[in-house]
Amino acid sequence: DAGITQSPRHKVTETGTPVTLRCHQTENHRYMYWYRQDPGHGLRLIHYSYGVKDTDKGEVSDGYSVSRSKTEDFLLTLESATSSQTSVYFCAISAGENTEAFFGQGTRLTVV
Amino acid sequence: KQEVTQIPAALSVPEGENLVLNCSFTDSAIYNLQWFRQDPGKGLTSLLLIQSSQREQTSGRLNASLDKSSGRSTLYIAASQPGDSATYLCAVTGGGNKLTFGTGTQLKVEL
């Protein structure tokens, strides 16, 4: 299995609070992604990174920010959590352009 | 905008049957197509990656084909087993090395 660790694995938080999810990789892959998975919508891209400090928005980026200060870590922050952000969040990595993507085990986030 | 569709949404077959899962995409300008498996409550496991220049890839009992010009891919599973029960997802890679996913086919293989 690709060395991807997501933390925490489960979190319950209150509306309006900030939340940070962490993705850590041991593969030294260039690309890192954050997706959310919701029933009826499949997986949708939130943000991605193509190198340290190089990030870009995905399809559903509103309400989320990211940071990548080291190759191995990609952080996803919900500035002020809302109930619509209740979801399962997946981190993915890939070595370079046109290469295989590998996924972490996911973080289940509930906003109450 | 790329749209990826998977049909059927759910499928139930008896053990030992050969089966085909379908994936279609609207924009043929892709770099590759990847098939994944997802077990309940788990992450995605990569099964096969087909580059845009390839027609098919095989891994064990799995065979994936790609017809880029028509925007279609199939995943063929031979001699299905109960352990194959899972949700199967296809994803295409476009500009920016970003994956666009279908909503998946939920497969149940019954004894």
Image (cartoon, grey):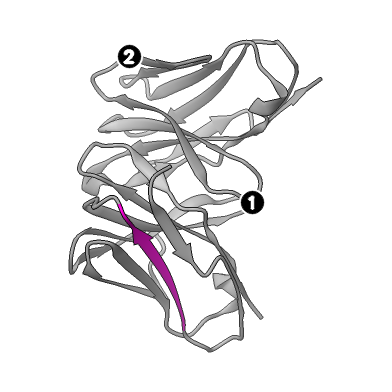
> Where residue B82 appears, x then y in whole percent?
72, 24
Which picture quadrant has residue A78?
bottom left
**Is residue A35 found inside the magenta-colored segment of the image?**
no
> Where residue B19 appears, x then y in whole percent?
62, 15
- Per the rendering, the mark at residue A82 is none
The answer to whether residue B17 is left or right of residue A103 is right
- The secondary element bearing badge 2 is classed as loop
Amino acid beneath label 1: Gly
**Total number of numbered discs in the rendering:** 2
Which picture quadrant has residue A2?
top left
Decide: few, some or many residues near mark 2? Use Cα within 10 Å; few <14, some 14-19, many ≥20. Answer: few
Decide: few, some or many residues near mark 1? Use Cα within 10 Å; few <14, some 14-19, many ≥20. Answer: few
Mark earlier in primary sequence (1, 2): 1
**Residue beneath the point at 22% across and 62% down:** A71
In the image, residue A43 above or below residue A75: above
In the image, residue B38 above or below residue B111: below
Q: What stretch is highlighted in magenta?
A: A19-26
Residue beneath disc 1: B41
- Per the rendering, the mark at residue B55 is 2
Q: Main secondary structure of the magenta part?
A: strand
> Where residue B49 appears, x then y in whole percent?
36, 28
In the image, residue B76 above or below residue B8: above
- The secondary element bearing badge 1 is classed as loop
The answer to whether residue A52 is left or right of residue B3 is left
Q: Which chain carries label 2?
A: B
In the image, residue A16 above or below residue B87: below
**Residue beneath the point at 64% across and 51% down:** B41
Q: Distance between the residues labelled 1 and 2?
A: 32 Å
> Extreme right residue here?
B111
> Where residue A23 appears, x then y in whole percent?
39, 63
